[in-house]
Amino acid sequence: MKRVLLLLLVLLYTLYAKEVHYNLVIDYKTVNYTGVEVQAMTINDGIPGPTIEVTEGDWVTIEVQNRMDVSTSIHWHGILFPKHNDQDGVPYLTTKPIKAQSSHTFRFPLLQSGTYWYHSHTGLQEQRGIYGSIVIHPKVETHKVDKEFVVVLSDWTNEDPQEVMRTLKRESEYYAIKKGSVQSLAGAIKNDGVSNMLTQWWNQMPGMDISDIYYDAFFINGKQSSSLDAKAGEKIRLRIINASASTYFYVQNAKNPLQIISSDGVDVEPFHQDKLLIAVAETYDAIITVPENGAYELRATAQDGSGQASLFIGSGKKVAVSDIPKPNLYGMKCGASMKPKKGGMKCGGSMKCGSGKMNMGKATRPMSPYPKLKALAKTTLPKEKKWREVHLKLVGDMRSYIWSFNGKTITEEDKIHIKKGENVRFIFENETMMHHPLHLHGHFFRVLNQHGDFSPLKHTVDIQPLAISTIEFEANYEKDWLFHCHILYHMMSGMTRVVSYDTSRTLEEQKDYKTFIDHFSKWYVWADVLALSQMNEGVIKAANGKHRIIGYFESDWDKEYDTYLVYDRFIDRYSSWFVGGSFADREEDRNRAIVGFNYLLPLLIDTQIWIDHTGDARISLAKEVMLTNNMGLELEYQYDTDLKSEWAATLDYRVNKRLSFAVRYHDEHKAGVGVRLFF
């Protein structure tokens, strides 16, 4: 009987549902936002793409035409599907890629209402411009307003995103240097943070890093500054979408706090928020009332303080938002064991994390407003169902730029197995100093907070630094659904899983799945060459996840050289092992097979120990200290049981991405000056 009723409901739904059609055309376009011409990817000739505006209960048909010479895709972020995953848009996992000069038609019913968005899920294309907004109006409006306005936040880099990833992989401080956010000895002295810095070093903790990348601009609806004409007294519903690749934003209104009424498309108990921290891929709906006598700024400020975008609402003289002071990155103070803290950080003017405190600035810098999120109805799961509990540690290493769950990237461990009919609980333990916005495709989950039975429903959850958080959901679908960090570069470097119902696959689906996993296995190659008046030194590296090939050479002007070539296997952020060969033309040296180990000692001292096939050994120690934002000092010591010891000190001043000036003293080759070139 139930099946018959369900079938009748589906038939009625189909008969009376409205059909809505959209056409999206993806193509290249040359843009110039900051004085540099860049080939972008656009949807219908714009960044962002057009808003898909529909009503709950509609059926939507969207034809996506790909006019580029590479394949692409579109994922409907936060959209629920009746049963299957074939409309979800993840290439090779759920949906065929949209190949070059071809098209694909999506068709699905709208089972929900709210604010959502769409974006490419192919490589790093989202960073290049393939994203847009979705507005699904409810059948019955719950909030009466005079106007609605979509606010799409995003970040922009003039660099090719693949070059961005290569830069992140090469253990470079370049983006921090460009932002002026290097944690240097001079900065620590200026900010009374020397003790904190030494404590971090001793505990093998890198400097605080809020954002990995330098961005050339930040946008609201594709513009750094724009205006919205509105009359005084009008109530406006702002549909705020963070469509950035890796930037969290503080959103502020110049006149009054935002009245938050919805999170990730689901209505919540309204509350007021002065500074809204919105994670990557989240959406919030807020209501504001347009004040008299002025155009008041709605500002989105990058969490790391590196830039902003503005929308002035109203008419007349512009009234700006008060600036948010940049975070004090020298305020981090941690004990010997920084452990994640249940419930996340409690944040006023400082943040408590485990046993430490982090003073992030002179003014309050709130975290995500999750304590204020309360569902309108109970969200508890059926008690009669079996429970499955999954523990996931969020692990990262900035120097090798490897991000993972439980220390394993998707190429090492690809699936989280669940069964249809279960209640599933994910417990996240963030062991990193960064926020991670985690998104589960095709599902909504409850984010457990102090509201208990009324914990909010979301599709993307912000996991705060050094925090423990829990989500729960009903496993009521089939097949495979992607789960990943929505910081684009974290996702592509390994912090990704497939939540799998273990539905059987056809042979073609098995082949597609392997292709999907292979997309996360990409080699990046780079090199540094130090050319000095008394000697030369260089290194070339190729990295693929936890695998690296490293070649090193050192030579003087008498053409004597010392080189090694090794395969290096990453273990964790502290250690790796390697095997290879060392080659030299010095009389006192010789060619030898070597096996060794790298380890990060307290005080962030890099240690390398190897032994060759004859039993001789070598130990090397290296420590780099940034003296100022652009200038670093590297100290090196090496002891070889065959060659005895040598040491060197190098002062390096970074000019740009490709060049730095260097002065070095080497105990054998003496003093010299030159340049370091980065390739």
Image (spheres, rainbow, N blue to C red):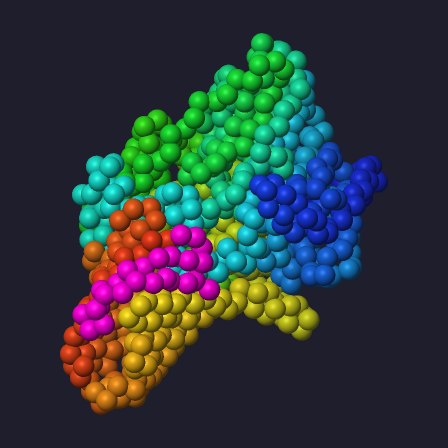
In the current view of this chain or complex, which residue is farthest to the right?
15
Residue 659 counted in the magenta span: yes
Q: Is residue 251 left or right of residue 583?
A: right
Residue 157 counted in the magenta span: no
Measuring from the top left, give residue 514's x and y in whole percent. 59, 70
Residue 48 placement: quadrant: top right
Q: Nearer the viewer, residue 142 or 316?
A: 316
What secondary structure prevails in the magenta region? strand
Residue 237 placement: quadrant: top right
Measuring from the top left, give residue 373's x and y in whole percent. 47, 31
Residue at 54%, 38% in the rendered image: 218
Compared to residue 601, the image places residue 311 above or below, namely above
Residue at 52%, 43% in the rendered image: 216
Q: Please count the marks in the image.
A: 0
Q: Which residues are magenta?
A: 655-679
Compared to residue 122, the image places residue 37 above or below, namely above
Q: Is residue 621 left or right of residue 677?
A: left
Q: Nearer the viewer, residue 117 or 212?
A: 212
Residue at 26%, 86% in the rendered image: 586
Q: Is residue 207 left or right of residue 269?
A: left
Q: Nearer the viewer, residue 317 or 435?
A: 317
